[in-house]
């Protein structure tokens, strides 16, 4: 076992999604922590002393009881905690969820605590009892599938209506670097312009070196894009479904102010195992097919480190 894990500070803890391979259920637990401090997202505090000792015990008991540890640990009937290094879990994730909660009606896990311990960041969230959409997709009627897609479009429209603090700049919600494993295993950026982002991502390299793809790049040459708030991994594996409704959208670590086509192109890479979901997504959502062709061409050539 890895070294003792930190304990959630005495306060109402926020849900981190916990998934069960057998049931396909992700739960959001409510915290029973003492509410002795207000959530502060201005900086990442380090858990220490008696709070750390208490959290270590809570983690050990949670692992023993629920046999669940990476990257999500169920702490009790009401709470879960997600943990990881700088490339997987960040203070930015908590700030993103807080931003979405305050500025939209999109259902997301509510953050109760975030701190640093054992060389990792720990994010405590509510527990949400619902199924991952990709696990129940084929159990839904055609009407339910279409309804889920229209619900999702409504939420994406809310994201795209948010006003960026620095239009044209590619950055996380707090102005820092973004994360996308297809680009790098480490956070990257921010970039002052979309052109800078594209250059870093490999656009010019593939266009100049691989002439068989030149036509694809020429089609989008000179197009001007907005930066809009984007989830970045919005496939059915990150949507919780219950009683005919989307009850939560989870895993916002790839979110940020990104080119307007990014949500569409990343959704293509998010759910290749559910072609019927992608086909319906294409029917309902704003499409950027030329940009998707470019992304596919780049993915054939560029291997990220």
Image: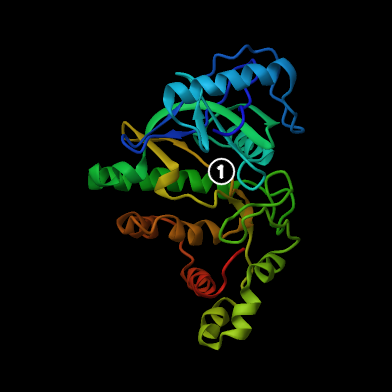
In which quadrant of the rendered view does residue 133 lie?
A: top left
Q: Of residues 86 and 199, which is closer to you in this image?
A: 86
Q: Is residue 193 above or below residue 86?
A: below
Q: Residue furthest bottom?
A: 211
Element class at badge 1: loop
Q: Position of residue 71 (x, y in %)?
A: 52, 38
Q: Is residue 29 visible?
A: no
Q: What residue is at 72 percent from the left and 57 percent from the top? A: 189
54 left or right of 62? right
Mark 1, other Cα within 10 Å: few <14 / some 14–19 / many ≥20:
many
Q: Position of residue 53 (x, y in %)?
A: 66, 18
Q: How is the image coloured?
A: rainbow
Q: Is residue 114 visible?
A: yes
Q: Is residue 10 above or below residue 47?
A: above
Residue at which label 1 appears: 252
Q: Of residues 167 and 123, which is closer to you in this image?
A: 123
């Amino acid at each position: 076992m890895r070294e003792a894990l930190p304990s959630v500070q005495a306060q109402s803890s926020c849900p981190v999604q916990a998934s069960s391979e057998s049931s396909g259920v992700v739960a959001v637990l409510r915290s029973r922590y003492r509410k002795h401090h207000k959530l502060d997202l201005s900086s990442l505090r380090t858990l220490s002393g008696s709070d750390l000792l208490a959290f270590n015990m809570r983690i050990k008991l949670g692992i023993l009881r629920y046999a669940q540890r990476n990257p999500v640990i169920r702490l009790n009937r009401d709470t879960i905690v997600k943990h990881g290094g700088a490339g997987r879990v960040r203070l930015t994730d908590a700030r993103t969820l807080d931003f979405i909660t305050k500025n939209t009606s999109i259902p997301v896990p509510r953050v109760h605590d975030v701190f640093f311990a054992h060389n990792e960041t720990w994010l405590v969230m509510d527990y949400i009892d619902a199924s991952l959409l990709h696990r129940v997709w084929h159990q839904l009627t055609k009407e339910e599938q279409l309804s889920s897609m229209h619900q999702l479009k409504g939420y994406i429209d809310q994201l795209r209506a948010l006003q960026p603090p620095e239009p044209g700049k590619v950055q996380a919600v707090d102005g820092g670097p973004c994360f996308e494993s297809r680009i790098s295993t480490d956070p990257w950026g921010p970039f002052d312009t979309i052109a800078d982002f594209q250059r870093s991502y490999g656009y010019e390299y593939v266009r100049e070196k691989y002439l068989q793809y030149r036509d694809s790049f020429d089609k989008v040459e000179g197009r001007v894009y907005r930066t809009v708030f984007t989830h970045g991994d919005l496939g059915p594996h990150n949507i919780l479904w219950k009683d005919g409704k989307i009850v939560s959208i989870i895993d916002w670590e790839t979110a940020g102010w990104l080119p307007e086509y990014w949500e569409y192109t990343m959704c293509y890479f998010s759910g290749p195992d559910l072609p019927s979901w992608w086909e319906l997504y294409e029917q309902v959502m704003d499409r950027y097919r030329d940009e998707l062709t470019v992304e596919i061409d780049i993915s054939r050539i560029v291997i990220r480190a």
